[in-house]
């Protein structure tokens, strides 16, 4: 399976597809809170049961993380379990000399919180 936006190729392209739910391939910012503190992330490939979040500091496998989805209509927060962590290095599809890198984590939603306060500002 090719990652067209980053030019990275998944080495497990021949592996069986584990996803059983439709995916929404949208990209949007999220705020993360976990054992390692707060961070910003980029949500991708979201489904009813989970999603992938690009972040510089993925949480540890099996840990829980709060994910806040900001919106003009009000924010929503999910508590999720980290199911996998990845650090991919590859070469850009355009043949550029600098390596392309993707770091992030796949999470499974446990539940969604109602209400809540705004997340703290991360600098």
Image (cartoon, rainbow, N blue to C red):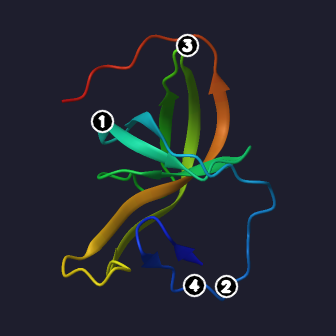
Disc 2, disc 1: CB below 8 Å?
A: no
Mark earlier in primary sequence (3, 4):
4
Residue furthest to the front: 94
Q: CA distance from mark 2 to mark 3?
A: 39 Å
> Residue 101 — which label?
none
Mark earlier in primary sequence (2, 3):
2
Mark earlier in primary sequence (2, 1):
2
Determine whether, in the image, residue 83 is placed left or right of residue 70: right
Residue at image point 30% right, 72% down: 100
Mark earlier in primary sequence (1, 3):
1
Image quadrant where residue 52 sits: bottom right
Image quadrant holding the C terminus, namely top left
Residue at image point 60% right, 78% down: 1
Q: Position of residue 101 (x, y in %)?
A: 31, 68
Residue at image point 27% right, 21% down: 121
Q: Secondary structure at mark 2?
A: loop
Label 3: few (<14), some (14–19) or many (≥20) C-alpha neighbours in 10 Å: few
Relative to 16, residue 87 above or below: above
Residue that mark 3 sits on? 74
Residue that mark 1 sits on? 37
Residue that mark 4 sits on? 12
Q: CA distance from mark 3 to mark 4?
A: 38 Å
Q: CA distance from mark 4 to mark 1?
A: 31 Å
Depth-wise, is mark 4 or mark 1 nearer the camera? 4
Label 2: few (<14), some (14–19) or many (≥20) C-alpha neighbours in 10 Å: few
Determine whether, in the image, residue 97 is placed left or right of residue 116: left
> Residue 15 — which label?
2
């Amino acid at each position: 399976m090719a990652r067209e936006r980053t030019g990275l190729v998944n080495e497990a392209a021949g592996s069986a597809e584990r996803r059983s739910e439709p995916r929404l391939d949208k990209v949007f910012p999220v705020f993360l809170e976990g054992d390692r503190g707060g961070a910003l992330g980029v949500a991708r490939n979201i489904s009813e049961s989970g999603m992938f979040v690009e972040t510089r500091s993925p949480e540890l496998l099996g840990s829980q993380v709060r994910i806040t989805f900001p919106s003009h209509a009000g924010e929503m927060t999910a508590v999720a379990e980290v199911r996998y962590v990845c650090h991919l290095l590859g070469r850009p599809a355009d043949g550029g000399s600098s390596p392309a890198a993707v770091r992030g984590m796949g999470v499974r939603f446990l539940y969604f919180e109602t209400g809540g306060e705004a997340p703290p500002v991360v600098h």
